[in-house]
């Protein structure tokens, strides 16, 4: 009775996999280091859970970060962290796989290891201890959490996990030492073993060298990529929760990668090349997944669904099949253009209350800097079509603190919002209006990420972000249609911490450890975030936040993630950084190849361009 939502921990969900633990050789636990409702909404874990459990020798289970109420009970009564399916302690498993989706979950990683009874640092683990492996977008700069992981997986899990599990079985049943095993692991494509590498620093705090400690350990880790999606598995029977989740629906992954090349977007770079899935394959998955779950909604997963060329065929097919079964189709990640609106208008059950645009910047100049590939004409034309199609509420997403940004650029956030309301009043007759038009603009605080052309850019200081936010807010109040306008912005302190961890190095491992030891978890949740713990830990270790977040980086500097090869070359990122400063637009991948380097994987959009 002391735990708020017991359904987070009891397991037994529909489609969860039960096996006889005495008949499997490898026990793998997948972990999302945040609360159950968020973790259960994550597609990546569902894919790996399904893939591992198809192996007869492996049983994959799940675990999520216990909410602070259960965390306190477990510590008080010495209850070890347990997996949902078997309720067995995590320390009895061979592997703990932790997905790293955002930097603000780093203290939760230590919570999970600590509650599980696994030594927090890899140097304190021995043969027989659970192996801790990390993957996901944050693993593309693993250095701030390198001390806590035995292995990081760079790339897509369908490629190298079988080789890792086969090697592990040999290690487990032989006298192979832990070090010998990890050296062999480092030679499997996409796998990085942090303790096999050494970092040295210059006097100014930048990296002097980063190199393997042994001759037979590779100097560079190349990510793994699935090029043929018809040959890999996809979960046809996803686990169905007893409680409401953040994303409570069937998720159909239609494409990996993105053709757009926005310079702020890490996902657009690390997931290249763009690889659409076969439409007939998707139709089959949709039918099977809806039948096996009983969900009443299906959504498409991709970085930009509008760029999936078979989208009209897929939606037409689903509408025809789902109409009689009262299944809704939701379409996230759409560009607001005639094509997208046409697709949306076909979905009869779509709620016409709110439509989302992401201009990202208030002026065309700044949209060119970030390579958004969206003109003001596109935005206004899309908004007009949306209003004529029956929508009367629009959400606009912007960033503030972008490289080269001026006050004219942020004033453009209010001006563009006002022009969209004017468009509504000028073109929608009073008798056709369902209610007041509402334009809500929200501004996030720009964070430069590894493997983007902006990885060298400084962040603006939090006090400057707040100053700009107040400036925009005042501008909104002064607009003629201010009653139809709303402006909101993100919290600065949490975003600064995200910026610190996104581009940090190994020195931050001690900082994260100290913050966790001060009792801090769930940093992404405003009610639990305490900036003072981070300030104290940084000061204790003589580290300066300015060094990691606010300084300009030279393109010649060795960055903590330079040993990782994502296919997109450093030369391309440098060229795009220069193009940004010259306000030069780079065409998307279908218009023209920009020579980013991803063509070497031999497929997807790159392959089409070659012909």
Image: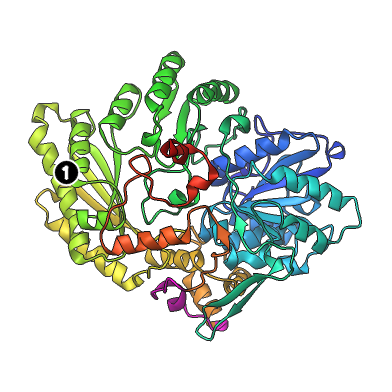
Q: How is the image coloured?
A: rainbow
Q: Residue at x 38, y 50 (%)?
A: 594
Q: Secondary structure at mark 1?
A: helix
Instruction: Specify start and end residues of the magenta stretch as a single range.
Output: 540-556
Residue 360 against residue 543 in the figure, above or below: above
Residue 78 against residue 294 in the figure, above or below: below
Question: How many numbered markers are drawn?
Answer: 1
On whether residue 545 falls in the magenta region, the answer is yes
Q: Position of residue 101 (x, y in %)?
A: 53, 52
Q: Residue at x 72, y 55 (%)?
A: 187
Image position of 522 (left or right of 406): right
Query: Quarter holding the C terminus?
Result: top left
Q: Dot 1, how many residues are within 10 Å of its Cα: few (below 14), some (14-19), or many (20+)?
A: many
Image position of 18 (left or right of 127): left
Residue 199 occupies quadrant: bottom right
Q: Position of residue 282 (x, y in %)?
A: 51, 26
Task: Please name the residue that numbered disc 1 is placed on.
Answer: 420
Report the predominant secondary structure element of the magenta stretch: loop
């Amino acid at each position: 009775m002391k735990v708020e939502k017991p359904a987070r921990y009891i397991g037994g969900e529909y489609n969860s996999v039960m096996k006889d633990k005495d008949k499997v050789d490898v026990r793998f636990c997948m972990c999302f280091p945040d609360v159950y409702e968020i973790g259960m909404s994550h597609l990546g874990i569902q894919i790996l859970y399904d893939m591992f459990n198809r192996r007869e020798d492996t049983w994959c289970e799940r675990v999520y970060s216990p909410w602070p109420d259960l965390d306190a009970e477990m510590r008080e009564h010495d209850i070890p962290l347990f997996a949902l399916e078997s309720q067995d302690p995590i320390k009895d498993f061979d592997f703990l796989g932790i997905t790293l989706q955002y930097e603000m979950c780093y203290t939760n990683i230590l919570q999970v290891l600590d509650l599980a009874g696994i030594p927090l640092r890899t140097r304190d683990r021995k043969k027989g201890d659970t192996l801790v492996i990390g993957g996901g977008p944050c693993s593309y700069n693993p250095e701030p959490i390198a001390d806590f992981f035995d292995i990081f997986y760079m790339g897509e899990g369908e490629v190298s996990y079988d080789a890792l599990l086969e090697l592990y079985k040999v290690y487990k049943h032989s006298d192979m030492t832990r070090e010998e095993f990890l050296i062999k692991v480092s030679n499997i494509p996409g796998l990085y073993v942090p303790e096999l590498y050494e970092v040295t620093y210059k006097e100014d705090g930048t990296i002097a060298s980063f190199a393997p400690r042994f001759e037979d350990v590779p100097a560079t880790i190349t990510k793994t990529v699935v090029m043929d999606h018809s040959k890999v598995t996809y979960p046809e029977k996803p686990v169905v929760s007893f409680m409401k989740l953040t994303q409570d629906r069937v998720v159909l992954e239609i494409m990996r990668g993105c053709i757009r090349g926005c310079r702020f977007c890490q996902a657009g770079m690390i997931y290249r090349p763009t690889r659409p899935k076969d439409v007939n394959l998707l139709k089959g998955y949709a039918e099977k997944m809806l039948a096996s779950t009983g969900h009443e909604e299906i959504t498409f997963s991709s970085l930009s669904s509008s760029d999936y060329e078979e989208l009209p065929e897929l939606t037409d097919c689903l509408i025809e099949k789902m109409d009689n079964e009262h299944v809704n189709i939701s379409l996230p990640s759409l560009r607001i253009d005639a094509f997208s609106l046409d697709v949306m208008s076909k979905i009869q059950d779509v709620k016409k209350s709110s439509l989302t645009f992401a201009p990202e910047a208030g002026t065309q100049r700044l949209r060119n800097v970030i390579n958004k590939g969206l003109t003001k004409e596109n935005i206004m034309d899309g908004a007009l079509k949306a209003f004529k199609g029956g929508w009367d509420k629009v959400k606009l997403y912007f960033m503030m603190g972008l490289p080269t940004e001026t006050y004219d650029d942020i004033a453009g956030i209010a001006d563009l919002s006002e022009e969209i309301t004017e468009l509504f009043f000028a073109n929608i007759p009073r008798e056709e209006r369902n209610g007041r038009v509402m334009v809500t603009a929200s501004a996030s605080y720009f964070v430069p990420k590894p493997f983007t052309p902006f990885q060298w850019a400084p962040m603006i200081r939090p006090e400057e972000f707040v100053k700009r936010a107040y400036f925009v807010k005042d501008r909104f109040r002064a607009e003629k249609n201010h009653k139809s306008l709303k402006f909101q912005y993100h919290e600065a302190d949490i975003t600064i911490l995200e910026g610190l961890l996104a581009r940090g190095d190994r020195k931050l491992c001690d900082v994260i450890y100290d913050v966790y030891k001060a009792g801090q978890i769930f940093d992404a949740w405003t009610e639990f975030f305490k900036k003072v713990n981070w300030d104290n830990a940084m000061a204790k270790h003589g580290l300066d936040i300015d060094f990691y977040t606010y300084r300009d980086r030279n393109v010649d500097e060795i960055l903590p993630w330079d040993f990782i090869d994502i296919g997109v070359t450093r030369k391309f990122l440098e060229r795009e950084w220069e193009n940004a400063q010259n306000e030069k637009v780079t065409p998307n991948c279908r218009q023209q190849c920009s020579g980013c380097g991803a063509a070497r994987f031999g497929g997807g959009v790159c392959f089409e361009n070659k012909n």
